[in-house]
Structure formats: C-alpha cells, structure tokens
Amino acid sequence: MMLPRPDECFCPTPTPLRPVRWNRLAASLVVLLAIMLLMMWLAPSARGSEAACAAAAEAVLRDHGGRVLPEGWRADGVRTVRVLGPRDAATMDHDPARLTVLIDDARRVTGARCG
C-alpha cells in the first residue's frame, strides 16, 4: 500500500559548497605545528632520567640490598620513587624515570627496578 504524496513537499535546495580558503587552512596548519613543537620542547627528556633511574636502582641494591630500608629514605637524581611491599597493589603504567624499590614484610630491600 502506498501512501498518497502530498501536493506540496518540503524539498530543501542544496546549498553550494564554499571553496576552501587556503589562507585559513595554512594558518591552522601553522598553529598546529607550533603547538606540536612547543609540546616536544616542554616534554621532559626521558633518556637522562632513565640513566639516573638505572644508577639509583644499582645504588639501592648496593647500599641497602638485603638490609632494612630506613624510614624517610630518598633516592638522589630520581623524580619519583615507589616502595612496594609483598602485598601492595601497583599500577601497570610504564614510567622509565620512576624507581620502584621492592621490600619484604620486614622492610628489607629485595629488589629495585625502573618503570
């Protein structure tokens, strides 16, 4: 069964597309490039912090390996330190500049790693 067609149907006329204004497009691309370069310049260098973390991990194992980690201990040259016990929950995000010190129930250092 077909429905009757109304005498007057609303059929909008298509609007013509406006041409791309190249000066606006070029300005947008320049702004985007400037933002990307600024973000790269402001981002911290991961290579230097990775080396500092590796050196701090070796120092922790050398100085405190198998011994009790003192309260208030701080690592030199590392931005973030995380001390994890055997039943502590940890996030799985990877931060190559973060030092993770593993301890047992008696707070003895059992390991150290970056990430």
Image (tube, rainbow, N blue to C red):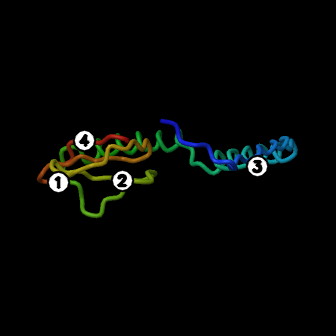
Q: Nearer the viewer, residue 4 or 92?
A: 4
Left or right of residue 24: residue 108 = left
Q: Is residue 69 left or right of residue 77?
A: left
Number of residues whose C-alpha sits closer than 10 Å to that of mark 2, classed few (under 14), some (14–19) or many (20 or more): some
* CB under 8 Å between discs 4 and 1: no
Q: Secondary structure at mark 3?
A: helix
Q: Residue 31, how many percent across, how many down?
A: 76, 49
Q: Circle 1 sits on which residue?
A: 107
Q: Secondary structure at mark 4?
A: strand
Give the amino acid at mark 2: Val
Label 4 belongs to which residue? 111
Q: Residue furthest bottom?
A: 72
In primary-sequence order, the first of circles 2 and 3 is: 3
Residue at x 31% of width, y 59% of height: 73
Q: Secondary structure at mark 1?
A: loop
Which of discs 1 and 3 lies nearer the camera? The answer is: 3
Q: CA distance from mark 4 to mark 3?
A: 47 Å
Which residue lies under the disc numbered 2? 81
Number of numbered discs present?
Answer: 4
Q: Residue at x 44, y 45 (%)?
A: 97
Q: Which amino acid does the dot numbered 1 rest on?
A: Arg
Q: Nearer the viewer, residue 44 or 8?
A: 8
Residues under labels 2 and 1: Cα distance?
15 Å
Q: Which residue is pictured at 86% across the width and 44% down the height?
A: 21
- Mark 4: amino acid: Gly
Kindly identify which residue carries mark 3: 31
Q: Nearer the viewer, mark 2 or mark 3?
A: 3
